[in-house]
Image (spheres, rainbow, N blue to C red):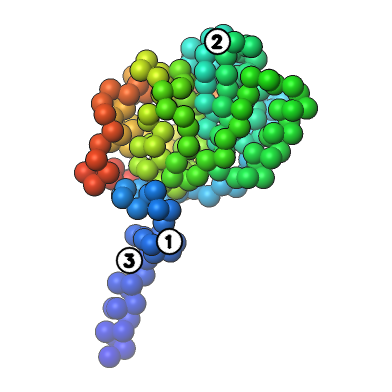
Amino acid sequence: MIRAMLAGALVLLAACDRLGEGSADERPAAARDFPRADRPVAPIVSTRWSSEEARDRVNEAEDIMDRAGIRPGMTVADIGAGEGYYTVRLARRVGPNGRVLAEDIMPEVIEALSRRITREKWDNVSLKLGAPEDPKLPENSFDRILMVHMYHEIAEPYAFLWHLSPALKKDGELIVVDADRPTQRHGTPPRLLACELAAMGFRLDELIPKPTAGGYFARFRRIAARPDPASIIPCAFRG
């Protein structure tokens, strides 16, 4: 009897591990038609990856914006904007004829960033409170969408990318910067990233290891329509 009870408990624990915290019904409604990621999701531990001064000393933002082809007049989304390190530098780069939308999923972060944008008078910046499963971006609006050191924190990557995809213009590009290490260690292995993006109709066009931002720089282009959510097979995680 005791052995049977222990076996049952182990099965239950394994099922809980596969499901993560909470039941399927507790997932956001917009994510329930999509598979869960077959990998750990890193917790959000800070709104900043490093100090702005340290990042500027190695010319991080300028290097990433140069590689991403950010030019005056463009419309750019900064996903997981945090304290706005990239937001304000993107705003300077695209100039008064361009636009930057800074998105984050934490209301207190958006409020703090709003105060900074107002204080520093960035008139070409707007803010958006997104959700873990949907960045809530306007369709056909962006020349570039940037996700810098935050992809591993996306709790519902398939739902998130499915909802994000229509926001890119026809020739728009999705730029991801992350560390080459397992997601539970606050990074994303490039093969896993490319697989999850491919499942959403994106092609990896360029991968540059160790830019000034650390980790790698990945450039994606949308080449196929969004799949039916029920047809998505999660990419296998190894690490």
Q: Which mark is residue 83?
A: none
Between 180 and 47, the one lying in front of the other is: 47
Which residue was labeled with disc 2?
Answer: 73
The amino acid beneath tag 3 is Ala
Between 105 and 182, the one lying in front of the other is: 105
Q: Which residue shows up at 24% across the image and 47% down it?
A: 230
- Measured from the top left, where is residue 98 in percent x and y? 57, 14
Q: Which mark is residue 15?
A: 3
Secondary structure at badge 1 equals helix
Q: Which residue shows up at 52% across the image and 26% down it?
A: 77
Between 132 and 177, the one lying in front of the other is: 132
**Number of numbered labels in the structure image:** 3
- Measured from the top left, where is residue 100 in percent x and y? 58, 22
Which residue was labeled with disc 1?
Answer: 26
Q: Which residue shows up at 25% across the image and 36% down it?
A: 227
The amino acid beneath tag 2 is Gly
